[in-house]
Amino acid sequence: MEKTSSFMGFIKSLKCRLIVFAIVVAIIPSLIVGSAILASYETRAISIRESEVLSQARILSNQLATSNYINGVSNSSETLLAQMSMLTTIYDGRILIVDDNFEIIYDTYNLDNNKTIISEEVILSFKGEENTSYDAENRYLEMSIPITNPNDETNTVLGVLVASVSTDNIALNLSYLTQIATVIVFLVIIVIGCIGVAISIHMVTPLTKLSDGIALVQGGISDKELVVNDYTETIIICEKFNEMMKKIRVMDESRQEFVSNVSHELKTPLTSMKVLADSLNSMQDAPIELYQEFMGDITNEIERETQIINDLLSLVKMDKSGATLNITTVNMNELLEQIMKRLQPIADKQKVQLVLESFRPVSAEVDEVKITLAITNLIENGIKYNKDDGEGWVHVSLNADHQYFYIKVEDSGMGIPEEALEHIYERFYRVDKSHSREIGGTGLGLAITRNSILMHKGMIKAHSELGEGTTFDVRIPLTYIA
């Protein structure tokens, strides 16, 4: 079973495919070139044989005409017969001499003497045409040549010379060449296969390094960056992998920190409430003023606990609901006014000026609850992380075009360091951990805001300078497209 699995793994591997590709690339051109060479050889060999025999046949026909052999009064019959016999022996063929009565007066095989021959080729030759044909199936070349006296200006056809020549020796040569070509192709396949194996091993080695490196990182054995510089592609993969691992490590650190922070945040109000309650219980005759003060402190701690829990529930609800949105047409101008009115007491307490500027009436298809939560978080952050000298401000503007509406939230607060801008939307991330704990919050606000905006197919960007304030730009489609 393991051998079968290993074999199937090799069959599906890049190494195997590279080897097969190399062999296929070697076979196809070799077969094409070999077939073309063999076909060219056969055509060329037959053409040469035809030219040679035709040339000899023409000379012989002229001699037959000038010697008056057709009329039987030739003084050189023996010479002519010897030439014809030699020609048939050399080319493994047969010669027929036909007179003007279509009677065979000479046959080198002595089989059809004095017989009549009527064929299309002979008839055309009596009209002065030379005819040549090749029978590939039976492997012989046949030609008919008119016998005319070159000294006779009338070009009268005295007879016809019919010659047939075997091409068996060409076929034998072709078969021999085919065998040689087959051996060569086989050797080429072996050589290319070996080269393909060597190349495939060389090409796959960086991928093996890549796999081994990833395995080490996944197993926690190595915390170094993955580096395989053999190919441009492996360099890009390593860069992307290292970026991913950095983000994963940041997320792991953030989650660990979140667990610690939330544990602290949830435990602190409970501890405070317990201390206050124990203090009240220990005092039998506590003044009403002290009792009210302690109860007010307990109420504040309960509100703090509730805020943490609500943030966690909001984030979990967004994750679980996914694309579930309760879309309605909302007047964004009125919604922003309501949010600003709701946050005004917090701004007054922080001595931060809130300003709303609407450039035009805007109605959009949104989930009112989720978009309210997103905008509230942005404005509330601007208030909380603002200057504490009484000169702080938060400016909110609303605008729109034919496709999107735009919300800009600017503040005069402490700003965000440049290196932290790319992390502010990560869950549980805090820019200034100590200051954030003093102000309150769980590091979930911007994560909730970003999720809500993305669910509306929108986008959010942050621009900030440390000590100069922060600007959030939000763009959301006016019409929701599921």
Image (cartoon, rainbow, N blue to C red):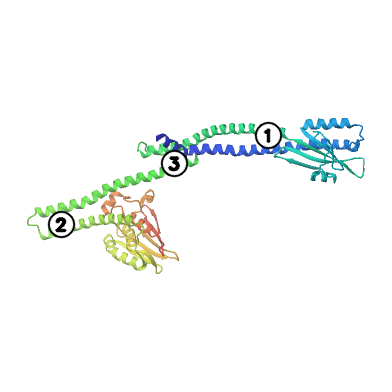
Q: How many marks?
A: 3
x then y, percent, for residue 46: 74, 37
Residue 151, x across and y down, in percent:
92, 40
**Residue tagged 2:** 294
Picture quadrant where residue 159 is located: top right
Judge whether 205 appears above or below 453 on screen: above
Quadrant including the N terminus? top left
Q: Is residue 377 above or below residue 196?
A: below
Q: Which residue is mark 3?
A: 238
Q: In this view of the protein, can residue 286 be seen by the observer? A: yes
Q: Nearer the viewer, mark 1 or mark 3?
A: 1
The label nearer to you, 3 versus 2, is 3
Q: Position of residue 135 (x, y in %)?
A: 73, 40
Q: Earlier in the sequence, mark 1 or mark 3?
A: 1
Tell me the distance, in whole angstroms, between the alpha carbons under discs 3 and 2.
Answer: 59 Å
- Give 392 or 341, whichever is nearer the viewer: 341
Cα gap from disc 1 to disc 2, whole angstroms: 112 Å
